[in-house]
Image (spheres, grey):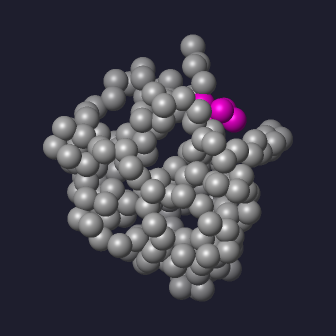
Amino acid sequence: MPRKNLVRTSEFPYHVTSRCHNQDWFQIPLDEVWELSLASFKEAHEMIPINLVSYVLMGNHYHMIIKTPDSNLDLFMREFNRRLTLKIQKRGKIINQVFGGRYKWCIISVNNYFINCYRYVYQNPVRAGIVQKCEEYPFSTLKNIIQCEEFSIPICDHYGFKDEWGLRWLNETVPDLERKLLVNGLRRSEFSDVS
């Protein structure tokens, strides 16, 4: 399948994900991958500034929502993934590739889609059965925000889902049909209605 052409925007956020080669697990402990991610964010952000909304690291992939003020998603992602890959390879003494290809992206241009994507990203560890609540997962910017812990770059999350009501909504189970529609929408260049 040919790679879709990047749509550049500074107006809307992107959902971005990247998965390990052959859907294997990271070859080093996840807490180490998290630390390497923080360093990679810092280095890539110094070169190509972005606005990070959310980031969740899973056992063999990650999800993030970012905005690119300079419409340069490709430049930032090249730097971030390259730096993260080199760090993982060095730490794990790995010679093979880490990620199974280029990152996947989707523009989120409608606010309703954005908040559902936001919840989808943070619910990954809950859906995987790792934690009961989104805020319990240690490898997520949500934890940094709630506990007022620093992240390696500023988190531009001003969406107010961190109070009691917001966390209850964030942890609400999404019906299967709605989740499937969301996943299908995120496979497109721009998140849109899919029937």
Which secondary structure type mostly characterizes the magenta part of the structure? Answer: loop
- Judge whether 55 appears above or below 129 on screen: below
Give the residue at x 30% y 71%.
149
> Number of marks in the image?
0
Residue 66 at what x, y percent from top left? 55, 52
Give the residue at x 60% y 24%.
192
Compared across the picture, whether 21 is left or right of 72 comes to: left
- Judge whether 118 appears above or below 103 on screen: above
Instruction: Give the quarter of the image for residue 164.
Output: top left
- Judge whether 34 appears above or below 12 on screen: below
Instruction: Give the quarter of the image for residue 98.
Output: bottom right
Name the residue nearer the viewer: 105 or 152.
Answer: 152
Name the residue nearer the viewer: 153 or 168.
Answer: 153
Compared across the picture, whether 174 is left or right of 192 comes to: left
The residue most toward the left is: 164
Give the residue at x 54% y 76%.
42
Name the residue nearer the viewer: 34 or 90.
Answer: 34
Residue 25 at what x, y percent from top left? 50, 63
Boundaries of the magenta span? 187-191
Compared across the picture, whether 145 is left or right of 13 comes to: left
Residue 102 in view of the camera: no
Compared across the picture, whether 29 is left or right of 39 comes to: left
Residue 8 at what x, y percent from top left? 74, 46
Residue 102 at what x, y percent from top left? 71, 55
